[in-house]
Image (cartoon, helix red, strand yellow):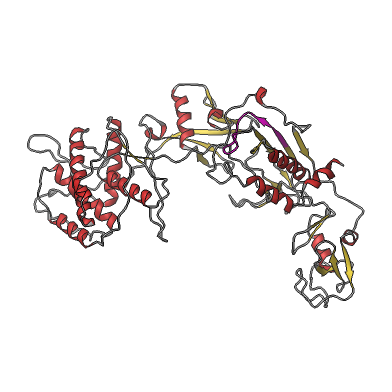
Amino acid sequence: MITGSGTIRPVRRSYYDPSSAPGKGVVWEWENDNGTWTPYDMEVGITIQHAYEKQHPWIDLTSIGFCYIIDFSSMGQINRQTQRKRRVRRRLDMVYPLVTGTLPKSQSWPASPGAVNPPSAPACTCPQCLLVMSIKAAVAAGSNGGTGVTASQQQLQLQLQQQPQPPPRKAVSLSGSTKLPIPASVHKPQDGAATVRSSLKTLASQVSRRQAASTPALTTTGSPASPPSANGKVTRASLNTLNRTNLQRLAIAQSRVLIASGVPTVPVKNLNGSSPVNPALAGITGILMSAAGLPVCLTRPPKLVLHPPPVSKSEIKSIPGFSNTCRKTTKKQTKKGKTPEEVLKKYLQKVRHPPDEDCTICMERLSTPSGYKGPQPAIKPDLVGKLFKCGHMYHLHCLVAMYNNGNKDGSLQCPTCKTIYGVKTGTQPPGKMEYHLIPHSLPGHLDCKTIRIIYNIPPGIQGHEHPNPGKNFTARGFPRHCYIPDSEKGRKVLKLLLVAWDRRLIFAIGTSSTTGESDTVIWNEIHHKTEFGSNLTGHGFPDPNYLDNVLSELVAQGITEESVLQEKD
C-alpha cells in the first residue's frame, strides 16, 4: 500500500479453515457496559466455536491469555477474578473474508436479439490497474482457448509501453508446495513493459491449467447462471466484462473454493524486510495472484500476548525483600490545622525589591500587584516570594490561589521547573495493589523471573478532591495486570511504585485519552507494561529503556530512593 505521502506499507490477508468460525460466518460477541455487542477477536471466536461444536458445557479461556469462562448453558462470560458476568451471543454473518453484493449480469453474449452492450467507462491507466486488467484479459483468452490478441489487449500493451521504465528491484521470495516459474526473459536485459507482459503470460497459462483442473465455476447468490453451450455443459462467464471491484470479489470467492478443494496455497514472504522494495513487490504479487484466482497465503501478523501462561497458586511466590504481597489505600485523610499561607512560609522567603520580570502565573510584572481575578486570599496582592530550592519568584497572591486550586496536601510544585516542595500526593481512588513472582520470563529478560502487579480499583463516588465531587466514576479494565522483570533494577522500581501507590499517584480520575470517556479512572503519568509476551501496542517487552524511563517518571512525581527511607520512618 502506498500512502498519500509516498510511504510504502505492507498489507496482509489471513485465510481461515472453512470449518472454523470465520469460515462458517459464525461471530461470537459479548455485551459491553453500553448495552451494545462487541465481537471477540478472531482467534478467541474460533476457540469458543470449537468448544461449542464439541458440546462442551463451558470453556476456560485462560489457556489463550484471558481470565474468562464462557458458560454455554447460560450464554454468559464470567470473570474468574471478579466473578462479574456478561451476556454473550452467537450469530451468523457473512463468511470471512466478507463477500457482499452480487456479480453483474454477464454481457459476453446479447441478452436478447438486437441487444447492444452499453459503452464502457474509460479504464484506469495506473500501473496497478493495468496489471490487473492484463491478468483478466489473459485469463479470459486462456479459458476460451484463443491465442489472438484482442483490441483491448492491444490497448493495454500500448499503455504498458508508454509507462516509464521502473528502476531495478529485488525479487520476492516465494516458498511452498507450489512455485511460480520465472520466465527466461526476466534474466535478459529488456524494458520493464516486456518483462511484465512475459510474466503475465506465464502466470495466465498456469491459471488456465489450474482452473481446468479445479472445481466447477462458482455461482454467486443472486447472479444469473451462464447459458448452456451446444453440448449441454455450463460455460464460464467471461471475465472481460467484470469491473475491478467485482473481479476482486470473484477472486476471493474462487480462492476459498480452491483452498477447500485441496489446491495448495503459495505463501508470499519477505513482508517484514528492511528494504521497502520487498513489501511493495510482495503486495503487488498478492494483488496479481488474487485477481487471477490464485489463493494467496501472506505471512500472518505477530500475535498479541497480554498474559503469561497459566500459573497455579503453588507457583506464585512472594518477592524476596518484600514483607507483604498486597497494599491497600483508603480515602485521603485531609491534613488540618495549616492554612495555605502557613504552608507557603515553609518553602519561600519574601522579596522586598522584586525585579522587573513577569510572574508566570498571572503574567503581570512582579513590581505590580497580582493580576489574579478569582477568589481573593487574605494576603496583599503586591507581595512577592522566592522559592528556596529553585529560586523562581511569584506573587504570593498567585501562589496561594494555585495552592487552593490543587490537592491541598501540604506540598507545593513550582509551576516553572516542576520542583516539588514537601511530599506530593495525588487523588487516586481507594483500591488494592497486589504483587508477587511468577515462574515465567519476559522477552528481553530471559535470565530472571517476572514480578506481576495487579491493580484493582472499584467504581465509586468522587470526593472533594476530584473533578466532579459527588458524581459517580467508572473503573474500566480492572483488574489491570502489569509486569516488571525480577532483576535488581526491577525490584527497585517496585519499591518506588509502592511509595507512589501509598501517595495515591498511580491513578487519577479524569478523561480517558483512549476512549474519550470522562469521570473514569486513568493512568497518572507513570507508565506500566501491560503486555507480557509481545510489544505490539508499545506497552510490552522487549523494551531495554523501560526501567530507566519509569524511574525518571517517578522522580518527576517526587519519588526517589530517599522517599523509600522516609516511608519507613
Taking 128 as reference, is 409 left or right?
A: right
Residue at 24%, 48% in the rendered image? 104
Q: Position of residue 424 (x, y in %)?
A: 79, 52
Residue at 33%, 44% in the rendered image? 100
Taking 122 as reference, is 266 left or right?
A: right
Whether 290 is drawn above or below 5: the answer is: above
**Which of the 4 image quadrants contains residue 344?**
bottom right
Taking 377 as reference, is 47 left or right?
A: left
Answer whether residue 112 is magenta in the image.
no
Q: How many marks?
A: 0
Q: Position of residue 184 (x, y in %)?
A: 19, 46
Answer whether residue 434 is magenta in the image.
yes
Q: Residue furthest front?
A: 188
Q: Position of residue 444 (x, y in %)?
A: 58, 39
| Frontmost residue, 317 versus 89 | 317
Whether 47 is drawn above or below 99: the answer is: above
Q: Which residues are magenta?
A: 433-446
| Frontmost residue, 409 versus 168 | 168
Residue at 26%, 47% in the rendered image? 247
Q: Position of residue 134 (x, y in %)?
A: 21, 51
